[in-house]
Amino acid sequence: MANPNILFYGAGAIGSTLSGWLSEHYENVYVLARGENAEVIKSKGLTLYEIDKTKSKTIPLKIITNVNNLKQFDIIVITVKNYDLEEVAKDIYEKLGDKPIIVGLQNGIENQKILPKYFSKIIYGVIVCSAWYDEPGIFGNRGKGQILLGTTNNENQEILEQVRDILALGFPTKITRRYNDAAHSKLILNIINSIFTIISKENLTIDDKFKIWKIFVSSFLEGVEVLKKAGYREQKLKGLPSWRTIEFAQNLEKKMALDSFEESMKFSWLNSMAQDMVLLKRQKSEIDTLNGYFIELADKFELEVPFNRTLYDLCKKQFKKVPFKPLHVDIVWNKLNENLKEKLKLD
C-alpha cells in the first residue's frame, strides 16, 4: 500500500488530531466531518497545538461530508464514540461493503460486539493520547502518546503489520498480542473519567483535591481487583500509571499525593466523557459502555465495588438533567460515605 486512501470517520478531538498528524506523511488522508467544524477546517485548515496554544500549527486537511464523496478507501479509522458506532458501521457497510480495512479506536470493548457484524478485516486500537476540542477547527493535545493495535484472537497479522507501518509515520504505533489485556488496562482509566465529569473543577481547596485523589485511587484499585479476578493481566500503557504505582500511592500523605497528582489533574477535566457532557453539552456519554460494563463484570464475579457503583449511579442520575452541571466534590464525597461501610477519612 504505497499511497493508501485513508479515511478518519469522525472529526472530534482524536479523529482530527490523528488525521492532522498523519496527513503530513500521506497525500490521500481524508476526514469525514460535518457542521461548523468541517467548514472551518475546509476554509482555514486544521489547527493543532501541544499544551501551549501560542505554538499552534495549521495543517491543510481534506474534508468530506459523505463516504460516497470518495468511492474507494483502503483503510477507515473509526474514531466516533461507542454510542454512535452502530450507525457509523452501517453507513460504511451500505456504501463500501466489506472492502476496506477497519480500525476501531473506541474505548472499552463494545466495538468488538458491533464491528464484526459488518466487517471481516477489523483491527482494534487502544489509544493513549490526550486531545481536546477548543473551538471549531482548533484542538489541543499533550503529545502524540501511543496506539497499541491488536485483534481479539491475533488474527489478521499481515493486515496488522501493514496498518502499523502506515500509522507509525504519523504517531507512535505498536502491535500487541494481548489486545484484550490492553483494552481492559485502559478501561480502568476510562471509568475514572466519570470522576472528572461528575465533579466540578471550580474553586477547589487543597482538601477538595485530596478528596478527589482518594476517590480516584479507591476507584482505580477496585478496577484492578475486578480485572485480576476476571483473568486479565496488566498491559503497560505508555504515559499512564501502572497498577503497582497506584497501589503504592494509596498510602501517600496529603502533600506528597497532591505533588504527584496535581499536574495531571488539571488535564483530567479534558477527558472525553467530560468533553461530551460539560464542554459540548451532548447529553450523550459512554457511561454505560464503560462504567456499566465494569459494574457487570464485578457482578459476574460477585465483587463489591462501592466506589465505582456509587459513581456510576450518581452519573446516571445527574447526566439525565438538562442542563447537566458537575457537582461539588463534597456532594460526591458525602454520597460515597453514605454507601460505604467504613467512612472515608482525610488522614
Image: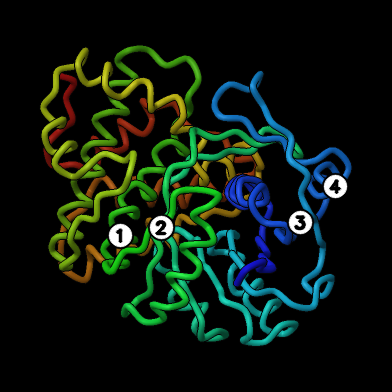
* CA neighbours of label 3 inside 10 A, class few (<14), some (14 to 19), many (20+): many
Q: Residues within 10 Å of mark 4 (few under 14, many from 20)?
A: some
- The total number of labels drawn is 4
Alpha-carbon distance for marks 2 and 1? 7 Å
Quadrant position of the N terminus in the picture: bottom right
| Marks 1 and 4, the one that precedes in the sequence | 4
In the picture as drawn, the residue positioned furthest to the front comes out as 2
Query: Residues under labels 2 and 4: Cα distance?
Result: 29 Å
Give the number of the disc on residue 182.
1
Q: Which residue does the image show at 58% across and 69% down from the upper left?
A: 85
Marks 3 and 2: CB-CB under 8 Å? Answer: no
Disc 1 or 3, which lies upstream in sequence? Answer: 3
Amino acid type at image mark 1: Ala
Extreme-right residue of the structure: 43
Kindly identify which numbered label has been placed on residue 42. Answer: 4
Q: Name the residue at 43% across, 42% down.
A: 145
Of the two numbered discs 2 and 1 on the same chain, state the one appearing first in sequence.
Answer: 2
Mark 2 touches mark 1? (CB < 8 Å)? yes
The answer to the question of whether label 1 and label 4 lie on touching residues, with beta carbons closer than 8 A, is no
- Tag shown at residue 126: 2
Locate residue 198, reporting x and y percent: 46, 38
Q: Label 2 crowding class (10 Å Cα cut-off): few <14, some 14-19, many 20+?
A: many
**Residue 215: numbered disc:** none
Read off the residue under disc 3: 33
Label 1, label 3: how many angstroms apart (C-alpha)?
Answer: 29 Å
